[in-house]
Image: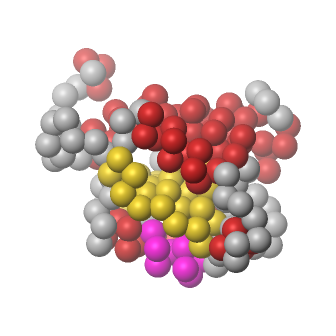
Amino acid sequence: MRPAGQPYRCGVLTLSDKGSRGEREDTSGPRIQELLRGAGYEIAVAQILPDRQELIEETLKAWVDEFRLDLIVTTGGTGVAPSDRTPEATRAVIEQEVPGLGEAMRLASLQKTVQAVWSRGIAGIRKGCLILNLPGSRRAAEENLEAVLPALAHGLEKLQGEEADCGRM
């Protein structure tokens, strides 16, 4: 279990072919980092990668297995374009899916735009680390993270062995 008062260690992974080549500025990754820091989380690593499923899988595994992060937030690759493979990469490395997080994010987005029906982001757990997929646009990533951010600390506490009854927390 994490020592009391120590912030959760997070990674922010941006998936973008153009961003990885320096052809597009990453605005969602820095905004996610800002929101997480504001909520008391420590950003241990941030990176931009191309939309390649194998590379995403390798990175997620390394960040969990070697860096021992508590939370990984991805941004990008959650739509229906042929290169959008983030949910598939996430599913390939997780042990459990947490469908309520994806549902909550889509619900929040649907209140803003009908285009949210195209978002395929998921959430899941690997070795006690929560992996959360957000859309690639800054606005959508911000809206999705804000929809679930208040619930994350409770889930992370449970993942790390907190034994208090959920109704009493």
Q: Toward which corner of the image does residue 40 lie, by quadrant?
A: top left
- Residue 124 seen in this snapshot: yes
Q: Toward which corner of the image does residue 66 lie, by quadrant?
A: bottom left
Tell me residue 70's x, y (percent): 33, 52
Residue at the extreme top: 168
- Residue 78 seen in this snapshot: no
Rendered position, 36 above or below 61? above
In the drawing, does residue 13 fall left or right of residue 15?
A: left
Name the residue located 25 percent from the left edge and 18 percent from the top edge. 168
| Quarter containing the C terminus | top left
| Applied colour scheme | secondary structure
Q: Nearer the viewer, residue 106 or 142?
A: 142
In the drawing, does residue 45 fall left or right of residue 73?
A: left
Rendered position, 55 above or below 92? below
- The stretch of residues the image draws in magenta is 53-60
Name the residue located 46 percent from the left edge and 78 percent from the top edge. 58
Residue at the extreme right: 114
What is the count of numbered marks?
A: 0
Name the residue located 45 percent from the left edge and 69 percent from the top edge. 60
Q: Nearer the viewer, residue 69 or 156?
A: 69
Residue at the extreme bottom: 54
Residue 136 is inside the magenta segment = no
Judged by its main secondary structure, the magenta piece is: helix
Tell me residue 14's x, y (percent): 60, 62
Tell me residue 19's x, y (percent): 69, 68
